[in-house]
Each structure stands twice: as structure tokens, then as C-alpha cells.
Amino acid sequence: MSASYQSILWNRQKKIYDLVLVCFVVAYISIFITTTAVLDPDVTQETLIIRSTSTLALLLLHVILCIGPLARLNPVFLPLLYNRRHLGVTMFFIGAIHGTFSIIQFHSLGNINPILSLFLSNTHYESFIKFPFEVFGFFALIIFFLMAITSHDFWLHNLSPRVWKTLHMFVYIAYLSIILHVMLGVIQYETSPVLVVLLAVGFVAVTILHLAAGRREQLNDREQIEVKNDFVKVCNIDDIADNRAKVVALNGERIAIFKYSNKLSAISNVCKHQNGPLGEGRIVDGCITCPWHGYQYLPHNGSSPPPFKEKVATYDVKLVGKEVWLNPVAYPDGTEREPATIN
Amino acid sequence: MIRPLRKYHFYLWRIWGVVLPLCFILALLFRPASPSQYNPGTSDFAFAVKKLTNSSSQLTVELRNTLRAPSCLVYVSSGSDDLLLGTIDHKGSYQFEFPDSGKKISIRLYDAIHKRDIMQTNVSYDND
């Protein structure tokens, strides 16, 4: 969270995250190259680079796509989500190295433009099995490039969260392209089934996690709550832990009711930064703290503490005995509401 | 995440869950034969040997169909050592000169990329 734009707002968690990431990348490439060079002494350096970067980028892409649903299913994985954008940018750079060396090795030695060669060296566009798999990789790399250059919060603010999120949802189209790129490439040029099996395992894992997380969210959205005199009874006061929230789905959206300092306040569950689930965060230093990237809001007015400017909608909440009642009509973002007092 | 995005995610992954396994199945069903399993028949070749001088002869390889092996090296031997003559690939006639060594040679076609023999045959000749 930052009031001004910096290239990277470093903190201890981000440094640890990136250190682990760099160590993993270096270790993977070293082990891959050494093992391959020992098993196949005739292999060229270009081939080693192309193969090590392709498998690493594919592995990182699967990890990136698993983090979201894993964090939805179990908060233990939330730390992985915190700096996922660095993981994504790293994956793009490794994929770009693979793409660059592939174009140099396979498409730059003729007398036509290498990019043109990528599209024309195999013209079986009418066939599924013989389709030029390089094209899928090229378009996926374009999507990853657009995502990488817009990954900074500068673009999130200037494009608006809705446009930014829509652009970054293209990762799923890119994933489909990558699966087709690898699958067709392996089927057209490899004799070993190992890579196809590994690819299928990765794809099945990603799909099952997304479907499981999606199913759970769908069930949460279907929860029905009794409506009475505008206010809705949502839970018992004892159902909410101190400095935590109860999330309820009303009128199609989710509202987080926080219990803190013997008070109750309700705000929108959707963080203004990247639509993170505020209700799964906790109160830190008197502020509701988003579990995804640490954006903070004051519970009684839904505004970020100065000098920050983010604001979310607020709601009226009241206590009837031990029952918590909520009015699902949202106040404009940042509207101050009197918290309900717990006697 | 807002509700429309949650729904979009869920719909998308249900579609991907059907489309991608279908792609896998189609790809495996229609997988082209691997070049390493390619075995040309004897009818694809014709061999003839002609004596040129007292110390050399000429091997003619008539290739009736373009080879689908990525590389095909032609070796001859009359004793223990193989002699590399050259490569063949497209349909056509290929001539190779080699040191004369008698009236019978062994011809070996070798795929160097897959490290396997494509064909081995013996040819007898007598041009005297």
C-alpha cells in the first residue's frame, strides 16, 4: 500500500518471497541443464536454454494458477498470494527467454523475417494435430507481456480496477494457448509420453482446484438470510472472533461484519485494490487489513487512513440481544457509520 | 472478488475442464506416427553396382519414394569396416564411387539422428 508510486515498495516479506523465487529459478535451471548435459552429451547450449526455460515457465505458470484457488480454500496459502505478481513477471521473463532463443534457433537462419517464419514455416492451419504450435506460444507470450508491463499499481489505478482485472483475466486464455502450444509441440516432435503425462497432471490439478474453489464460492453466494424491517439477522455475536469478521452474502454482494474493541462495524467485503476478500483479513493497528496485499481501511467509515485514498461502502449494523442484524443497503464509499456497541 | 468475476471464473473453468481434456484425447487419437517407427520397404530402393576402373566401382541407389526418415546415410562394406558414401533423401537416382573390393558388397542405410539401421542388404556384381 502506497500513497505515491514507487517501482517496488520493498518490505521484509517481499524480499524473502523474491529470494526464495530467485533461488528456486537458479536451482531449477542448474539442475535441469546439468542433468540433461550428462544424459545427452550431444545436446547444444541453445537447446538446453530453450528446454530449461520452457519447462520452468510452464511449472511457474501452474504454480501461479494454483495459488488463487488454494488461498480461497485454505488461508495457509495466503502468503503465496501476497507477492504473486513478482512470480508472474518472473514467469514472463523466463518465457520470453524461451521464445527469443526458439526464434533464433528455429526461425532466424533463413532469408525471411523470423517472426514471419514463425507463422509460415508450418502452414497446416487446417489440421488440429499438425497445427503450427508455435503460434499458440507466441500469442500467449503477448498476453503475458501485457500483463507484466501493467502489473504495477500505477496501471491498476490508471486503468481502473475493472479494466485491469479484465485484462489480467486473459491469463486463462493464455493458459489455454500454452497448453495447446506444449501439447501439440510435444505430440509433433517428441516420442516420449512423459511430457504429455506431466502436462495432463498439471492441468488436472489446476482445473480441480479452480472448480473446488468456485463450487465453494457458489455455495456461499447461495446462502439465504431472513429479512425483517430492512435489517437482516446474520449471526450471533459469539460467531465472530475478536478482530475478525463474519462474511454474509446479501443482494448479490458480500458484506464483512467486523468485531473489534467491543464494537461492530460492517463494510463491503471487496478491497478496492484487487477485489481481495476484506472479511478474511483481520484488524491490525485498528484497521481492517486485506489478506491479499495488506491494504487497510478504518472499520467505522471504510476509508483508508490518511494519506491513502481508497474507500469502500459501509453498512448499518445493530445488536438485538446477542443477535447481529445488518441493513443490506450500502452507504456511499467512505461514509462514516456509528459502530454497534457490545455491552 | 466481486460476484460477476466469481461466476466468470467458475464458468470459465467448467468450460476449460471439458475443452482441454477433449484436446488431449483428440491429440492422442490422431497422433501422427513417429519418424523413428518409419520403415521403408525393399520396393522403395533399387541398387546397382558398376565397375569403373580396376580399383573403383560406382554404386547407384534408385530411391523410388522420398524418405520420411530425418537422415539417411549410405554405407558400403566388403569386409569388417563400413565406408560412408553419402546421404540420400528425395526421390531420385544417386551415384557414389567407392574403392573396388571384390564382387560382393554389403549396403547399409543408417538413420544417424535416431541411431538405427533403416535397411541392410547385400549386392553381388560381376562387370568383367
Image: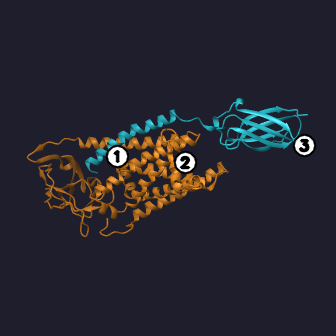
Chain colours: A orange, B cyan
Say few, some or many: other residues with alpha carbon within 10 Å of mark 1 (under 14 / 14 to 19 / 20 or more).
Answer: some
In this view, the residue in front, A48 or A248, is A48
Q: Which element is circle 2 on?
A: loop
Is residue A198 visible in the rendered structure shown here? no
Q: Which element is circle 3 on?
A: loop
Residue occupying the point 30% across, 42% down: A216
CB contact under 8 Å: marks 2 and 1: no
CB contact under 8 Å: marks 2 and 3: no
Q: Which residue is mark 1?
A: A73
Say few, some or many: other residues with alpha carbon within 10 Å of mark 2 (under 14 / 14 to 19 / 20 or more).
Answer: few
Residue occupying the point 27% across, 40% down: A219
Q: Which element is circle 1 on?
A: helix
Please, what is the three-letter code of the amino acid marked with disc 3? Ser
The percent position of residue A103, horizontal first and vertical second, equals 54, 54
Please, what is the three-letter code of the amino acid marked with disc 2? Ser
CB contact under 8 Å: marks 3 and 1: no
Please, what is the three-letter code of the amino acid marked with disc 1? Leu
Chain bearing tag 3 is B
Which mark is on residue B55? 3
In this view, the residue in front, A108 or A195, is A108
Q: Which residue is mark 2?
A: A121
Q: Quadrant of residue B115?
A: top right
The percent position of residue A130, horizontal first and vertical second, equals 52, 40
Chain bearing tag 1 is A
Chain bearing tag 2 is A
* 3 vs 1, front mark: 3
Q: Give how far apart the Cα atoms at labels 3 and 1 are.
A: 82 Å
Q: Quadrant of residue A214?
A: top left
In this view, the residue in front, A8 or A342, is A8
